[in-house]
Image: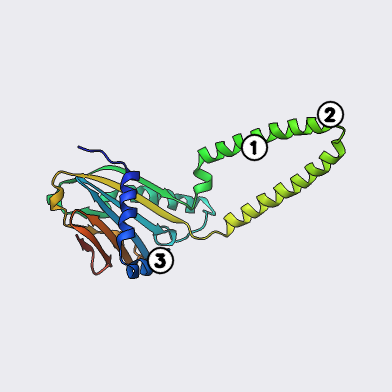
Amino acid sequence: MKKVGLFALSAISLGMSATVSAEEAGHRQHEAHQHGVVEWHIAQDGDLLMVEITAPGADVVGFEHAPENKEQEHLIHEAEETLAAVGGLFAINTSAGCKLTEHHVTQTLMEEHDDHDGHDHDAHGHDDHHDDHDKHHDDHDDHGHKDSHDDHHGDHDDHAGHDHHDEHDHGKESSHGEFSAQYTFSCSNPAEIKTVTTNWFDTFSTTEKITVQALTDKGVVAGDLSPAARSFKF
């Protein structure tokens, strides 16, 4: 079986998005990150099927800002676990024989707190800058420009503090946190992929509509799901 990862299937999904009509694309752009509206992208590549879900934080946990207390942190972690348990959210018709092989859940409400690698990278960059700065300082001392350099250093500190303040304020003002989940299935009978039925509206009751775009061997299909219409046909 040919193996295709989530990123490859994401590229297929992006290609699918480019093929939709201008009217549909404009409609979806207008609804981007609209509370009560969740987006699904479905892409097939042979016997592999990927479902990608993007949902506003308000739909999933009731808020879109960084958690302000332990209770809100718990809600985020609980939501991540719920999204990872795909069986409770949607099902592909059983005759297609699709089995979950890979899943990935992310969110942006706690991104800065959880991104350990990003923090290490920043720390490393700061050390390098500090070393370069010390060397630059020594060079200025050797040429008798210590006072001038100190003035420049003071300006640099003021500028750095200003940047940090701006970044902090920008992060605090951001209020569009969202959840993203990707699921990859291996289907033993991909020609039988016909429908996806969802229980999303039972789990996340504030969602009013799910917009779906799908690219399968049968072609491109787009449509909406709602509490009254929970099955999508390919």
Using the image, tell me which numbered label, if any, was put on residue 142: 2
Q: Amino acid at mark 3?
A: Gln
Using the image, tell me which numbered label, if any, was put on residue 126: 1
The local secondary structure at tag 2 comes to helix
- The image quarter containing residue 203 is bottom left
Q: Amino acid at mark 1?
A: His
**Residue drawn at x 67%, y 51% as measured from the top left:** 163
Q: How would you rate the neighbour count of disc 1 (Cα within 10 Å): few for under 14, some for 14-19, many for 20 or more?
A: few
Cα–Cα span, label 1 and label 2:
24 Å
Between residue 179 and residue 87, name the one nearer to us: 179
- The image quarter containing residue 188 is top left
- Number of numbered discs present? 3
Question: Badge 3 is on which residue?
Answer: 29
- Tell me: residue 176, above or below residue 125: below
**Residue drawn at x 62%, y 52% as measured from the top left:** 167
Q: Amino acid at mark 2?
A: Asp
* Residue 29 spot, x, y in % from top left: 40, 66
Q: Nearer the viewer, mark 2 or mark 3?
A: 2
* Residue 183 spot, x, y in % from top left: 30, 47
